[in-house]
Amino acid sequence: MMLRTGVLVAALGLSGALLAGCGDDGSDSESEEATQNGGSSSQASEEQTSGNASGTNGEGDTQTASAEPVSLIFGTGGTGGTYYPIGGALKGVFEASDLVDDVQVVSTGASVQNINNITDGLNQIAIVMSDVAYDAVNGENQFDGEPADIQALAGLYPNVVQVVATEESGIDSIADLEGKRVGVGKVGSGVEQSAQKVLESADLSYDDLAQVSHTGYADSVTSMSNGNLDAAFFTSGVPNSSITGLMQSTDITFVPVSGDVADKLLEAYPYYETYTLPAGAPERYDLGEEVDTVAIRNMLIVSGDMRDDVAEELTQRFHDYLNSENVSVGALKQFDPDTMNQRLVAPVHPGAEAFYETLTSNGDSSSSGDSASADAGDGVDKSKQTSAETPEDNVEAAEGSEASGGENAQDKEPQS
């Protein structure tokens, strides 16, 4: 607890830089998260905490508080990753609601820090990876003995475990990695966690490899191109531009994570799901044959004390935005909006659950309310716009050419 207090004090002290959009460079290293500046101004945090509390303390207060708009601090990730531009795109979508006064999108160290910030009252909404959320809810690993009160609004796009080997290495299965030189991602990263779990499911460990290289995507690709690595793990959206670049210069093989390896992985870790890299899809490597692997879904989470009406409204507007023609970040086009409430490893917020029940009762998941649908059509209510920028402009400012929803909009290393 003393360590948590120290991190909180540091975050409050450095809040100004974060609200200006400063953060990490998109690195996937979890070990770096503790040093990221994920906080926001103490005044904004106190105001939002007060606003949330007024909506949950007693029946008499709930009705009054429900009419009051709230301010939200949205924890994302590094400015070079995918979480941050998603926050920028959703800012205007959420602010179009009469229940939301303002959304401040802040750059953070991503999943672990986002959950800590929600626990400490610094963020009220955030994007995280399911494996980290699972640990937080169950008080395991980084959250040992301190389960976090977080709840899910929706599932997002998957981070896909992509194991790539040079063709000359002769590696065709995870078992073939034994005795080979393998890049496993940076120390403590989401990539390394996936690599360790996949190897474990194949009854392998680092000791069984000829060389373990803790390299990020770019360095792994360089080493494979130079013949210094036989294979590497990439856990990201599809396509990953580093892999696409490698394919330009080197003959490679996509190694499946399937059969007994996948079965053991899925049984041991409920946040994994199956995923197939399709054949003949130019936007996804244009493979000659499909490759079965696994993936970890990203999630949109909120504080457990968020008002039900606010949570329901955010979920509805997010759903309607995904079904509109205005989605500006490629990662948000990588999953079916009708699966938003599926395979969630954190409890679903009652407000979000209420919205999902309306989809079931209506028998039509493509439409969910006139007011939100109208606002989602152009992404932002102009009468409530707080700057000259639309959500799409916010994305471009954060991520440049990736904002257009191009193929590389989600190839950054996981920010878990």
Image: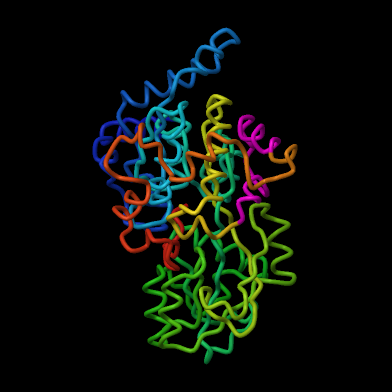
- Residue 233 higher or lower than 245, as above or below: above
Q: Which residues are magenta?
A: 336-358
From the viewer's side, name the closer residue of 78 and 355: 355
Q: Say left or right for 175 vs 323.
A: right
- Residue 84 higher or lower than 146, as above or below: below
Q: Quadrant of residue 136?
A: top right
Q: Is residue 351 magenta?
A: yes
Q: How is the image coloured?
A: rainbow
Residue 25's spot in the image, x, y percent?
Answer: 32, 56
Toward the bottom, the furthest residue is 168
From the viewer's side, name the closer residue of 249 and 267: 249
Residue 203's spot in the image, x, y percent?
Answer: 67, 69
Which quadrant is home to the N terminus? top left
Q: Is residue 253 magenta?
A: no
Residue 45's spot in the image, x, y percent?
Answer: 37, 26
Q: Residue at x 49, y 89 (%)?
A: 251
From the viewer's side, name the closer residue of 314 and 413: 314
